[in-house]
Every structure is written in C-alpha cells, then in structure tokens.
Amino acid sequence: MRILIGDDHLLFREGLRRLLEQLHTDATFIEAGTFNEVVEQCRTGGSFDIVLMDLHMPSWPGFDGLRDVQALQPGVPVVVISASEQLSDIRGALDHGATGYIPKSSSVKVMMGALNLVFSGGIYVPPNALAAAVATEQSPRRRSMDGVDRNSGYGLTQRQREVLDCLRAGKSNKQIAYELGLSEGTVKIHVTAIFKSLGVKNRTQAVIAAAAMAS
C-alpha cells in the first residue's frame, strides 16, 4: 500500500505515519510539506492507495485543491486531517469530494477507527458534524398524549428519511443534493448518520433495512 501524507508539520506527519504503520505494516509512505508538493507527488510519484492531507497548508488554493488532487489520482480516496473543526470546513471538504474528514484533536482510538473505516470503503464524518446537521434539519416533533414521538422514524429526522427515500431510488449524492436543495457535503453527513442509526455499513444494507422496516 502506498500512502501520501500532506501536512506542513513534520512532527504530525511522523506521528501519523507511526499510527498508520500499526494498520499497514507493509505500507510505503510519501510525505509532502506544502500543497504544491502534494500535487507534484500526485503528478509524478505514481499511483497511491490513499491521500491524507491537511487544509490551509502553504500554497493551499482553497477547496478546489481537493478536486485537483482527485483529478491527478482518479478513484483514490482523499481524506482531510485538519485542526479545524468548523462545520463550514467539513462541509466544504466533503462538497469537493473528500472521502472523510478527521479532526487532529481526535484520540488515537478515534483516529484508528476513522482510518479503518476509510480503508474499508466508508466515509468518516466527525460526530459533531453529524449532530450539527441533525440540529439544523430537525423539524419540530409532535407528541401524542401518551408522550410517544410520532415523528421519530426509527431515529431518523424528517430530512434523513427524505435522503433515505432517495437512496432507495438509487440516486447519487449529487442527485439527492439537487432534489432536496442541499449541498453534497450535507448529503454525505446525512447518509453517514443514516448508516449509524440503522446499524449498516453501506447503501445496499441501508436500502434493505429500510425495506424491512417498511414491510
């Protein structure tokens, strides 16, 4: 496995490399300290299995830089590992194609779990981003006289149920974003929350679970 690590802090690159060595003992690591170096490695360094990179590195051009990296490494997961935990940065990264967003403040256990999820084909979104998305999209709940929440929908918000309906129709994140008036980053956050609520790992399992609940 070939892993590209892009971060302008040498100590963080070394720490991340040591962590990844625990997951993949046979991995080869290539490091870059600026965004331009990341691009150069993507252009001339051969193909990678995953790219891990920070935001706001020297020569960072903005979120469009993620698209540049993906264009040079088609189909390769690009994961942001950043000190920023702002929802705008998380959504911006996901909107521009990032496969996951891992805060640098994460514990070793959380970081290992997040990386394992990404390596297995999943998308990692920080819990605070999921909570913020739910809070933003949460519609007023109605309760009957017995106190039962009639809008719970198996623990999903109204917006998440709408996203789930779109998943059942086989629609892509881009199509869902267009139809529901959301950003693709917000759709990814909702999809991750749906997977967690239903106890599934992918779209196919989510659709099967939704069909079973509806029957």
Image: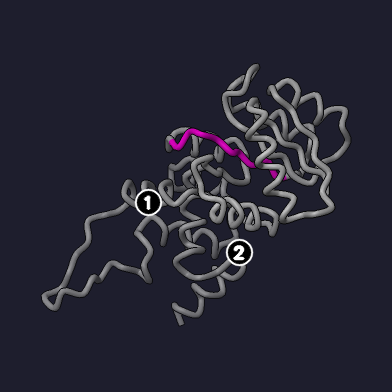
Query: Toward which corner of the image does residue 161 lie, by quadrant?
Result: bottom left
Q: Gap between marks 1 and 2, in whole Å? A: 20 Å
What amino acid type is highlighted by mark number 1?
Answer: Ala
Horizontally, residue 194 falls left or right of residue 40, namely left
Q: Is residue 157 left or right of residue 13?
A: left
Left or right placement of residue 10 versus residue 201 in this view: right
Q: Give the residues in magenta.
A: 77-85
Residue 91's place in the image compared with 167, above or below, is above
The local secondary structure at tag 1 comes to helix
Q: Residue at image x 22%, y 61%?
A: 141
On whether residue 81 falls in the magenta region, the answer is yes
Reply yes or no: does residue 52 show up in magenta.
Answer: no
| Label located before the other in sequence (1 or 2) | 1
**Depth check: 181 or 16 in front?**
16
Given residues 169 and 12, the one toward you in this image is 12
Residue on which the image places disc 2? 202
Q: Which residue is mark 1?
A: 131
In-image side of 96 versus 27 (left or right)? left
